[in-house]
């Protein structure tokens, strides 16, 4: 190590001891977490160690300047990360909104088909779809045979599927 490098390290070491709290406060003013503040303070002095020429009278001003630059870089980076996060959340929210609209369209198409069905078929379909009743429960309520209930459900579901496919563009 040359005498210039040794001299520079000594100056930076002395500056570190004198200015650590001041540099910390530069980062704290921006409401940066303590651990991150410590990392940024360390980065300031590491950057100074990489300098070839240090003028002793200007070290304090140089330290403060580097600290403010580091703070600005850190805050810009954080703002960018937040923007990317918010944009992706907005896109995700938008996709849910589109899905909700599609579900609404499908439900409207389903209801339209149900209104056009024969009354008994519509009743059986609604009992299965919206009341979650089994074919056995429907048999007990309607007095139809199980085979008749299943046949009506089969026809009703096919009608609904066909209409929903048209609405969904499938």
Image: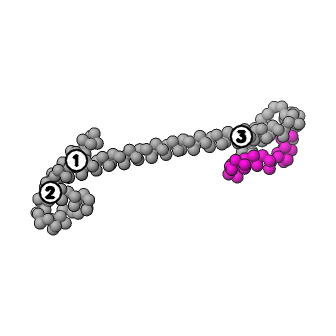
Q: In which quarter of the image is residue 124?
A: bottom left
In the foreground, 134 or 29: 29
| Vertical side of 146 occupied by 96: above or below | above
In the foreground, 120 or 154: 120
Q: Which mark is residue 161?
A: 1
| Res. 169 visible in picture | yes
Residue lying farthest to the bottom in this orientation: 140
Crowding around mark 2 (Cα neighbors within 10 Å: few <14, some 14 to 19, many 20+) is few
Q: Is residue 108 magenta?
A: no
Look at 82% across and 38% down and name the residue there: 61
Nearest-to-viewer mark from 3 and 2: 2
| Res. 136 visible in picture | no
Q: Which portion, as a residue range, is magenta?
A: 11-38
Cα–Cα gap, marks 1 and 3? 60 Å
- In the structure shown, which secondary structural element does the residue marked by tag 2 occupy? helix
Residue highlighted by disc 3: 70
The quadrant of the image that shows the N terminus is top right
* Image-based side of 139 in relation to 167, left or right: left
Residue highlighted by disc 2: 119
- In the structure shown, which secondary structural element does the residue marked by tag 1 occupy? helix
CB-based contact (under 8 Å), mark 2 and mark 1:
no
């Amino acid at each position: 190590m040359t005498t210039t490098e040794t001299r520079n390290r000594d100056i930076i070491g002395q500056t570190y001891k004198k200015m650590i709290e001041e540099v910390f406060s530069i980062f704290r003013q921006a409401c940066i977490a303590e651990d991150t503040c410590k990392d940024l303070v360390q980065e300031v002095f590491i950057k100074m160690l990489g300098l070839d020429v240090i003028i002793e009278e200007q070290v304090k001003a140089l330290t403060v300047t580097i600290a403010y630059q580091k703070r600005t870089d850190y805050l810009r980076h954080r703002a960018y990360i937040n923007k990317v996060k918010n944009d992706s959340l907005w896109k995700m929210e938008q996709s849910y909104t589109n899905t909700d609209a599609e579900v609404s369209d499908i439900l409207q198409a389903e209801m339209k088909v149900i209104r056009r069905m024969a009354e008994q078929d519509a009743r059986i379909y609604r009992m299965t779809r919206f009341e979650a009743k089994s074919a056995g429960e429907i048999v007990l309520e309607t007095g139809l045979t199980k085979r008749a209930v299943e046949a009506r459900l089969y026809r009703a579901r096919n009608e609904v599927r066909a209409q929903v496919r048209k609405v969904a563009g499938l």
